[in-house]
Amino acid sequence: MVPVLLILIPLLAGIASFFTGSEKTARFWALLASLFTLLVSILGLTILKDPSYLAFETSWLGSLGSSFSVKLDGMGQILCLLTAISYPIILLATWHTPHKKANNFFGLMLLTQAGLMGVFLAMDALLFYFFWELALIPVYFLCSQWGGERRIAVTFKFFIYTFIGSLLMLVGIIYLYTQTPGNSFAIADFYNINLPTSEQSNIFWLLFIAFAIKMPVFPFHTWQPDTYEQTNYATTMVLSGIMVKMGVFGIIRWLLPVLPAASYAWGDTVSTMAIIGMIYASLIAIRQNDLKRLVAYSSIAHIGLMCVAIFAETESGMQGVMIQMFNHGINIIALWIVVEIIERQFGTRKISELGGLAKKMPVLSILLMIVALANIALPLTNSFIGEFLMFNGIFGSTITKYNVVFMVCAGITIILAAIYTLNMIRRVFYGETNEITANAVDIRENEKWILIAVVALIFIIGVYPQAILNISSETVNEILKEADITPYLIGK
Amino acid sequence: MTIIQILFWLLSALVLLSAIMVVINRHPVYSVIWLIITFFGISGHYILLNAQFLAVVNIIVYAGAIMVLFLFVIMLMNLNKDMEPQKSKWLKLVGAIACGCLLLVLIAALKDIDINNQIAETNTGNIGLIENLGTVLFTKYVIPFEISSILFLSAMIGAVVIGKKD
Amino acid sequence: MNALIISAVFGVIMMFTGIFVKQKPVTRNIAIAGVALLLLVNILEMSGIDFFKVHTAGFMLFDRFALLFNSVAFGSTLIYFILSAPDMEKVGHYYADYFALIFFILCGVVLVASFQSLLILFLGIEIISIPLYILTGSNKRNLISNEASLKYFLMGAFSTGIMLMGITLLYGATGTFDTQFMNIETEGTSALVIAGMLLLFFSMAFKVSAVPFHFWTPDVYDGCPTVFTSFMATVVKSAAFVGFIRLFYDAFGSIHDDWKLVAAIITALTLLVGNITAVFQQSVKRMLAYSSISQAGFMLLGLLALNATSKEGIILYATAYSLATIGIFAILLKMNDHSFESFNGFARQQPLLAGVNVIFLLSLAGIPLTAGFLAKFYMLKATLESGDFLWLVILAVIMAAVSVYYYFRLIQAMYFKEGDGNAIEVSPGFKLMLVIVAACLIVLGVFPNLLLNWLYF
């Protein structure tokens, strides 16, 4: 029941939102719906933990071997919780941002949430694909209608990129479907397919490109900085906080366990791509003068690390990815909130034009400092746990020969991350005030409390990560068992 | 080589030659006249197949009625050589290549046919006689026959729609 | 058989309507009632109630596939009449005759969907084509329309010639017109059979405007009065496809391996050329013409695969494609000019029409939750099931992504570009009908079995 509610609440509320009248009603309605979703998500973690509440299946396209099958497993719990938490945060943080045709805006936002939930919950490949696209279409409208000057062209690039990816994924899914014994789309049947490695490799790339574009992994990342830059903040937060996790999630659930031999064969290639992307993105971030682009490139670097850790296929690395997906989501949303505040006050995102904000905006500075430290994974913050586990996993990986190389290279990007993050803080918040920043006033109440809430989350997870690790450990072990390549190696 | 075979080859040569002349000839009126000759040649083939009725119909309908109409139209429109638009060289080349390919395929298809095996029922077949034709048309092929009436009806309406003054 | 006879009868009735009924709305309503009746009797025939017990002597076979497609064609025509019939008034003076010609076309559609003999296929194709030549040229004062008609006629006549040649060669090789009794697998594939088959293939490829036989399509679709382009690009085109698949399924299914590669190459070319050329079009009408070529590429996948899935797929594809295209054309007909720019700011003026138009475009682009997605899905599935055409499937999906480019340009114009657009007025009934069509697309996109179960039960 819980998974159905998680999809239905935002879906119905989103459709209803199109018919709401004033901006205020639409806003309250969206907030109410998202809070309700959050409540259901938390209930699913606590009171309604019994497996019978967490799974739902009903027949749908019977003749095609597809069913409406949704289930909340450990990984699903974490990502649904992230989605459910993010939405109230985003809505509250952008509470005072005016939107033209607000009812459409919030309706599309909620529809996106329904799609995202569906992606994380689907246990049927066709259903997964349906939700994958359902999450994309409203985002296309959100990005094209509300955003910067070049938004239409940029969003179009983003859309075409992801659409090509998802269609290739569709081919892969249909191919796998024809290989299942009884022609079924159920995930359990997908896990039982044993294809020879060469066939797996073809399918691997079909699926991987879709996920890689979404994450994004180098060299499929070119849509991302532009899109983040041009899009309105609320959508950017959804895109970077939650949507990129679709890619990571896709690899963990639909790639690694389904095509273990190909994942093994191509793991090093993928990791190398991710590492190149990390270093490249970090170097660009250092040279970046635009705050939005800086955060965008920093996101590419973080996601790259997750990608390497996934293909290391160790328990610790995988657990690290799980917790880091959650952390990255809330940290980057917090960063966007700060960037939005700055842009709204000063009308510019150029680092070179800002300075001395710490004197004028003390509260913001302190909160940003903590978020920034979390971004570079300092101990006591949430990211530290995640990155530590991932590094541990990469180092201890038996599946790749280059684990030390990967670890050293990834380690360099941590240092680079510290450089660009701290450099940004130094230039924006310290130094002399100039005529642009002279009349700055501190942040609004709603933003303050939202940021404080996020910071509290950062510390809570940083101190007690076990809460999240416990949720995901079972799923991680299952996936690693499915992804085990020993049967293939014995065959050789 | 029997007389029928000799006639067959002669008629075939005539048909091919006149058909080529239809295409080559610059002047539309000459083209139509060559086309009439082609129809006569084909009617000759029908006679060889012992289908006198079809031969006569072919001459009356095609060579007689339709071609005369064509001639009238062409003469009324007063088409001259000069009005013919010049096609580009490339277009001609492409056309030649495409049709050459088609020719090649057809020749390849037909070269294996055993000509000695007498498929055509020359002089002995009787399907082309008016009585047999009528019987077959109204028994075995009655459905296509009836359906073709719809075709003619729609063509008639079309002619009215297109031809009548607004 | 119900539909065949009644459609021919209604063609005649419409002719007389032209003489006795002077009010155009009455004429229109008679035509709408006629198509509704056709749909009804055809559904009755699917349920086993046949009014005319005619012995077809093996010339036609009214099987499930044929009957279901007839229903789809009649349903699409009904929607087309309700949405666009008022716009036919603007074309010329022969309002009732246009309906008569369309009823004759429907008669041809029935023949092409249910033929079992090559003779009937030929007659069906001709009965479809000749009225279409007329309809294309029906705007007599417009030179472009005349040119389109003449071009279509010449090209069509040429392809009919090729088809006749093919039929002749096949008759020479097998001694029969009956597709079920050609026994090609036992007779062996002589060069005569192959040549005949290829000629038939090419002429059918011409009718469905597959590349490289597509050159007539953009000019003809563009020159034809828009209201008839809508019919021509949807019902007629799907019918040609159903005939194409039926022909190759029945007659040449046993030598599938011999022509598979040719079909694959033509499919790939159609997908490539159709989509890439469509990107560069500046007029929505012309874009839709090229889009019809690219959609034909996807339908050709069904021909290539030639299995049970592809039969289901072609029905679904025909439905999804026809409904969406008829809907877009109905809206396009209300616009003053056909450029992309004329749609600027459309969403602000007509939010409902813009909304349903988005659903049509999404369906054509193949976005999930619309029938267009499942249609494409069935085609891809059929091709993958038949094996060894992974490259073609990948090409197809990349081209589907390209198609998003030109379909979404219209969405961008409607929603994200500012413009006065042209103020258009539509009746509530028109809006309601479009909403129903959009709802059909979504319902079929979620429950395709509502349609496909008719193939079996």
Image: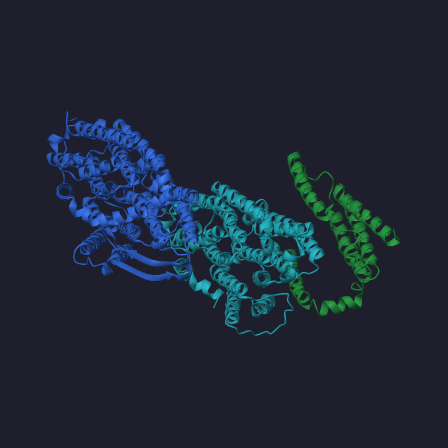
Q: Position of residue B120 (x, y in %)?
A: 79, 57
Q: Position of residue C94 (x, y in %)?
A: 58, 60
In the picture, residue C53 is in which quadrant? bottom right
Q: Quadrant of the C terminus of chain A?
A: top left
Which of the pair A169/B117 is nearer the observer?
B117
The chain coloured blue in the image = A
Q: Position of residue B142 (x, y in %)?
A: 69, 68
Q: Position of residue C183 (x, y in %)?
A: 65, 59
How many marks overall?
0
Q: Relative to C418, is A89 on the left or the right?
A: left
Q: Relative to C444, is B51 on the left or the right?
A: right
Observer able to see residue C153:
no
| Residue at 78% over, 64% down | B127
Observer able to see residue C308:
yes
Q: Colour of chain C?
A: cyan
Which of the pair C325/C393 is nearer the observer?
C393
Q: Colour of chain B?
A: green
